[in-house]
Image (tube, rainbow, N blue to C red):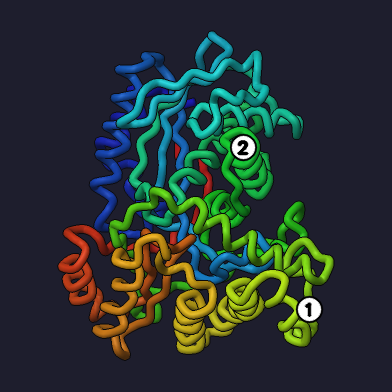
Amino acid sequence: MKKKKLLLEELAQGAHDGWLQDIYVDQSMTAAQRERYIKAVNHYGELFGGEEVEIYSTPGRSEVGGNHTDHQHGRVLATSVNLDAIAVVGFNEENCIRILSEGYGMITVDLADLSMRESEKETTAALIRGVAAGLERLGFATRQGFNAYVTSNVLIGAGLSSSAAFEVLVGTIISGLFHEMKIDPVEIAKVAQYAENEYFGKPCGLMDQTACSVGGLIGIDFRDPKVPVVEKVSVDFDSYHYSLCIVDTKGSHSDLTDDYAQIPAEMKAAAACFGKNVLREVGRDEFMKKIPEVRKKAGDRAVLRSLHFFAENERAAAEAKALSEDRFGDFLGLVKESGASSFQFLQNVYTNKNVQEQGVSLGVAVSESILGENGVCRVHGGGFAGTIQAFVKNSFVEEYRKVLDGVFGEDSCHVLKVRPYGGIRVF
């Protein structure tokens, strides 16, 4: 714990500017982050008082490769980005977790009862309770109550996994306050997924939480989802003079639950034709031989989505290998292939419920029409609405941003950096 008054003085004097620049990977952001931290500490003091605090941070994430592969126990390539949720934290004497997130009301979770509550389904309280319960089951108890003030600039609904960042943030706080930051980041990710699946009531894979918790650019193999293989991929996009851009097409995610759910359901229906639970357990050659049977039992779209999986699963591994071997041009080609496969075969760029609303398709079309040799783009994340991802030459970024902001509104295009850290204790 640090004395609140001392921390505020150090921040104001710029004593931690080097550390902030290291975290956020962009010198131009340092002054704004310094003021953000000062403001957060002051807000905590107004809410909870206390003399000592700690500060934790968890980043958002961007899926680079492996679109809809994780739920089939496939491979992905993902990165943490330099947008994050931060929490100013201190102890309380009331045996409860009390969290106020900027813009929302106070949430209180009683540590005496961490059992799942049906009444809390689809609420933030469920995520907090689920993370605490999951860690306790692993022997990492929350030993006393704490208060937290959370502020986040991870874009909500923009495919950067704001919910996963929050879940991992809670787990990282518990690791820091009570277990000397010794809980493995992958274990925190699995507990975060458990909280979202079992307590919140939303089925999801493990990619988002792992990318947020581990940090940096990572390849993940979910062949055994209980023991995912996570490998760091060393890359500096700036060294290639390219930037990672995420464009929010401002599409509504309402009424899309069925569209998202049908993708894993159809892939699993195809796998069931072979007596398997997921497509990772099915050989591609075997699948190709039995396409007529799969068509009959699961339908043509299930076949197309399965063909996307087989190619995308290999592509995610190939992307990581290309970057590791300094073959950036090959990486860009694979990103473009991923986008085409998602559009043509996975078919997650727009919903058939409203074919006149195709923001993601429009974002891809406009991007491809102006990028030429200046970059590549693809659908980002779950799809149907939300965001596209582009890797754009630095010399063309401002032109790209201007055009895409003109289509989707000011500040739709976000230029991000790969953050080298996952969930951390900052101070």
Looking at the picture, does residue 322 appear above or below residue 406? below
Task: Look at 64% across and 76% down and name the residue there.
Answer: 303
Nearer-the-camera pick, 222 or 252:
252
Looking at the picture, does residue 85 appear above or below residue 294? above
Q: Position of residue 186 (x, y in %)?
A: 66, 49
Circles 2 and 1 in contact, beta carbons < 8 Å:
no
Quadrant in which residue 36 is drawn:
top left
Tell me how far mark 2 sits from mark 1, CA to CA.
32 Å
Task: Look at 63% across and 27% down and name the residue there.
Answer: 178
- Return the residue found at the far right: 275
Nearer-the-camera pick, 66 or 347:
347
Q: Residues within 10 Å of mark 1 (few under 14, many from 20)?
A: few
Q: Position of residue 415 (x, y in %)?
A: 30, 64
Could you say which disc has been placed on residue 226 in the image?
none
- Return the residue found at the far top: 94
Nearer-the-camera pick, 135 or 307:
307
Could you say which disc has been placed on residue 283 in the image?
1
SS label for mark 1: loop
Label 2 or label 1, whichever comes before in sequence order: 2
What amino acid is labelled 1 in the image? Answer: Gly
Taking the image as drawn, is residue 19 in sight?
A: no
Looking at the picture, does residue 12 appear above or below residue 141? below
Task: Look at 58% across and 73% down and name the residue there.
Answer: 301
Task: Look at 67% across and 28% down and name the residue there.
Answer: 133
What amino acid is labelled 2 in the image? Answer: Ala
Tally of marks:
2
Could you say which disc has been placed on residue 195 in the image?
2
SS label for mark 2: helix
Q: Is residue 307 left or right of residue 370?
A: right
Taking the image as drawn, is residue 326 in sight?
A: yes
Q: Position of residue 50 (x, y in %)?
A: 40, 14
